[in-house]
Amino acid sequence: MREAFGDVIVTTGDDFVATVEICRPPNNYFDLDLIRSLADAYAAIDSRADSRVIVLCSEGKHFCAGVDFARPAPGSAAARSEEGIGDLYGEAARLFASRTPVVAAIQGAAIGGGLGLACSADFRVGCPNSRFAANFARLGFHHGFGLSLTLPAIVGRQRALEMLYTGRRLGGEEAFAIGLCDRLVGASELRPSAHALAAEIALSAPLAVRAIRATMRPDLVERVRAAMEHEAREQDRLRQSKDFAEGVRATAERRPPRFSGR
């Protein structure tokens, strides 16, 4: 079975694994439309008996390079006016509300909000060329997508602080060493390994898996919503700063930023 939700394609096999593929190569930048499409796909999978686990993956070079700052920032007044759709983080919360476990296959970059998307999954499978970065501070910006909650839960508070403060990139081996990746395989084995993990989960009783998942993630949706509300306020505040303008400009010009603290 194959079904399209905007730029998201869902393929379901006979092993109870649904592959959810983002199709915006090569960078797979996200915006409100894409996150809404992912949330719609997850909701549809939740309602079907033929799908017990999701493999989240992307077409192209990178898993998700975050937001394309050449366009209006998603969730901003300008973006809402331009796109005519709802709030980005409201849609993102729907991903966390899904009842179906998710295994993410991370090729290339999971940067900024792309890291947030990767951390919304239950498990992450990476390869040596995978790259992870919470590069927000290097843009003069505040992190988002619930990373205040998800990243410390995955790698620990101190590792999360280091990633958020420095914005430095972690390769696949380092990400695996600190627990950001649950499996590290060769690039050619990335999707097969993610699918194998998902298929192994799908062999368990689906009602039991969903019950265990709910127990292990108590009040997660409410906590993520609260975290994203705070993150959004800080993002709106810092978006007005000269440092943010300099961070975006420096990134576009491929040079170190010169921040002024204003």
Image (spheres, rainbow, N blue to C red):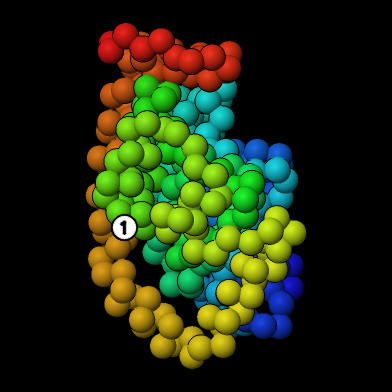
Secondary structure beneath label 1: helix
Q: Which amino acid type is marked by label 1? A: Ala
Q: What residue sits 69% from the left and 73% below the top?
A: 12
Q: Is residue 246 above or below residue 209?
A: above
Quarter of the image where the N terminus is located: bottom right
Where on the picture, by quarter, is residue 167?
top left
Q: Residue furthest bottom?
A: 205
Front in this rendered view, residue 244 or 11? 244
Quarter of the image where the C terminus is located: top left
On the image, numbered disc 1 is attached to which residue?
153
Front in this rendered view, residue 91 or 27? 27
Q: From this viewpoint, is residue 201 visible?
A: yes
Q: What residue sits 32% from the left and 33% below the top?
A: 165
152 left or right, relative to 26:
left
Q: Is residue 137 above or below residue 66?
A: above
Q: Is residue 242 above or below residue 206?
A: above
Position in image of residue 84 (x %, y %): 51, 36
Q: Is residue 5 above or below residue 193?
A: above
Q: What residue sits 71% from the left and 77% below the top?
A: 13
Q: How many marks?
A: 1
229 left or right, relative to 47:
left
Position in image of residue 202 (x %, y %): 56, 82
Position in image of residue 209 (x %, y %): 43, 83
Where on the picture, by quarter, is residue 21?
bottom right
